[in-house]
Image (cartoon, rainbow, N blue to C red):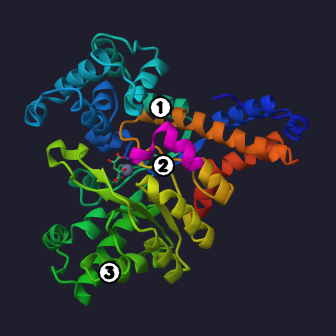
Amino acid sequence: MISLVENQAVQAELLTDAVKLRQQVELIVNATPALDLHTHVFPPEFGSLYLSGIDDLVTYHYLIAETFRSTDLTHATFWRMTKAERADFIWQTLFVENTPLSEAARGIVTVLTAFNLDPRAPNLNEARAFFKAQKPREHLDRVLEMAGVSEVVMTNDPFNEQEAQTWQSGSVTNGRFQASLRLDSLLNDWETVAETLSRQGFQVESEISDQTTTEVRRYLDKWILLMRPVYLAVSLPAEFKYPDTDKCDRLLHEVILPTAREHGLALGLMIGVRRGVNPALRSAGDGVGKADVTVVERLCVENPDLRFLATFLSRENQYELCVAARKFNNLMPFGCWWFLNNPSIVSEITQERLELLGPSFVPQHSDARVVEQLIYKWQHSRVLIAETLSETYRRLLESGRAVTPKEIARDVARMFSGNFRDWVGLSRGA
Ligand code: RAT
Ligand code: ZN
């Protein structure tokens, strides 16, 4: 990363020239470390959950969905292939027979270029050899450095057996990987969870009795102690209502909100997914739906002592989320989630948020699953955030208020990490 000019006089200089202003914004955005508040990456101690290298990159579920738009291959045949065969097939389809124009495909090109690998290669041999030669821990350090990411927040599911075993083995030590306790199974698939909890010796029933809520609470307390999450998180369907009359609502009211309160944990809400729209695509088969932003307003008004992080999947919900955040200072909008993480939409959402909220939001998270994705997701986002921010400062300059490099650095640091750290009570050590 480029180091910032430390000189006090330069830091305090008023940037009255639009070209110089833009250069400074780019420099500062590129040099400011980001705390990535929502990812699906794991450090190497999680064994096969640590995803890295060309086969994991090319078989990203975003690219699997795109591949089926350019092939006649059946889903069943594709799923019968090994991971390496799938990667070869996707490479051939999206990168050799077609031009990698989509954002997820361009991301692969950015990663290959970052490691001096040929993005026009006829096959994956060179890339495979390169990634195979890397030592996981050193490679991870290098990737985080290249991505300009100081810390990442994982998505941690205690109902995933492999993950649970790693936590229980006591081998989780990597300080740059923070945990977030994911509640999807609990809130969206209660019947399965009730069976699992019973097997683990918790006295729960399918019906949500007082004993059941006490036991679920005991389960969560145990995992909070083990994982030390920086927040609780859940993704919710587009149809999510609050309040409601279903089991999800009872668990939310009687277990999740009290747990967040008593542990002083923020609750992350990711709303608007429609799971399994096309089951034949498996993990690539989820879709989007327009949700109701007033659910978040109600959660905020009823729980003024709790802090909520929120992101919506539908483009149509973004403006309403900004307006809700203007009304509730216990609501922190974050990121351009999943199908929104495309240049045109990231620019639009970032501008909308700056106009309505100033610097009081978190512009981006990566949602990376494979560590090297951090490189492209942050590189692409930084370009867009710098552009939008420059334009915002330029308008301010036109109105008669120039900014200094010091002020820009303060704003960017706030958006890239400070807002989140303050929200969840993470120290500013990194
Ligand atoms: O963006 C993604 O990778 C999605 O598959 C989901 O993981 C989503 O981000 C989620 O956290 O549910
Ligand atoms: Zn995610």
Residue 129 position in % (x across, y down): 31, 15
In the rendered structure, are the residues bearing label 2 and label 1 in contact, judged by CB atoms less than 8 Å apart? Answer: no
Rounded to the nearest angstrom, the CA distance separating label 3 from label 1 is 40 Å
Residue 143 position in % (x across, y down): 48, 31
Give above or below for 154 relative to 269: above
The residue nearer to you, when weighing 16 against 13, is 16
State whether residue 427 appears in this view.
Answer: no
Amino acid type, callout 2 = Cys
Q: Quadrant of residue 132?
A: top left
Question: Is residue 153 within the magenta segment?
Answer: no
Q: Secondary structure at mark 2?
A: loop
Residue sitting at x 28%, y 40%: 47
Residue 385 position in % (x across, y down): 61, 40
Q: Nearer the viewer, mark 3 or mark 1?
A: 3
| Residue that carries the numbered disc 2 in the rendered image | 336
Q: Which mark is residue 376?
A: 1
Amino acid type, callout 3 = Asp
Circle 1 Cα neighbour tier, 10 Å, few/some/many (<14 / 14–19 / ≥20): many
Mark 2 or mark 3, earlier in chain: 3
What residue range appears in magenta? 338-350
| Residue that carries the numbered disc 3 in the rendered image | 244
Question: Is residue 343 within the magenta segment?
Answer: yes
Query: Which residue occupies the extreme right position in the image?
Result: 9
Amino acid type, callout 1 = Tyr
